């Protein structure tokens, strides 16, 4: 009886699983429910939208996104843009 109780305790008190990593193929996935600039930019580029291309001055989408998100003055709605199915929908997210 003692050995059964000890065995159950050892099984129940075993090591806890580590954190689950991003889904393979997901573009720079952040925490669950959070869309990163990398994911937003990859999606915009995949759709062929202007947001996914460099600016006329050569700034990349990642640079623009990071600058806006850290500016303290404005925020891009990354989740809205990431869920958009076309460029017009991404444009609508920015209004």
Image (cartoon, grey):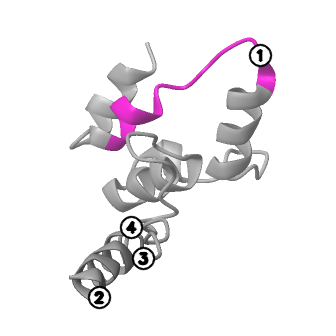
Per the model, the C-alpha gap separating discs 1 and 4 is: 28 Å
Q: Earlier in the sequence, mark 2 or mark 4?
A: 2
Asked which quadrant contains residue 64, the reply is top right
Q: Which residues are magenta?
A: 71-82
Mark 4, residue position: 26
Q: Residue at x 79, y 22 (%)?
A: 71
Near-viewer residue (61 or 38): 38
In the picture, measured across the screen, residue 54 lies left or right of residue 7, that is right
Q: Earlier in the sequence, mark 1 or mark 4?
A: 4
Residue 72 badge: 1
Q: How many marks?
A: 4
Residue 14 badge: 3
Mark 2, residue position: 3
Q: Residue at x 47, y 54 (%)?
A: 39
Near-viewer residue (25 or 57): 25
Q: Earlier in the sequence, mark 3 or mark 1?
A: 3
């Amino acid at each position: 009886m003692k050995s059964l109780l000890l065995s159950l305790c050892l099984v129940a008190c075993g090591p806890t699983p580590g954190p689950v990593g991003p889904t393979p193929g997901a573009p720079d996935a952040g925490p669950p429910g959070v869309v990163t600039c990398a994911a937003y930019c990859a999606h915009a580029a995949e759709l062929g939208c202007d947001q996914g291309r460099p600016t006329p001055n050569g700034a990349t989408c990642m640079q623009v996104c990071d600058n806006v998100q850290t500016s303290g003055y404005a925020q891009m709605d990354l989740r809205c843009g990431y869920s958009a199915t076309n460029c017009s929908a991404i444009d609508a997210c920015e209004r």
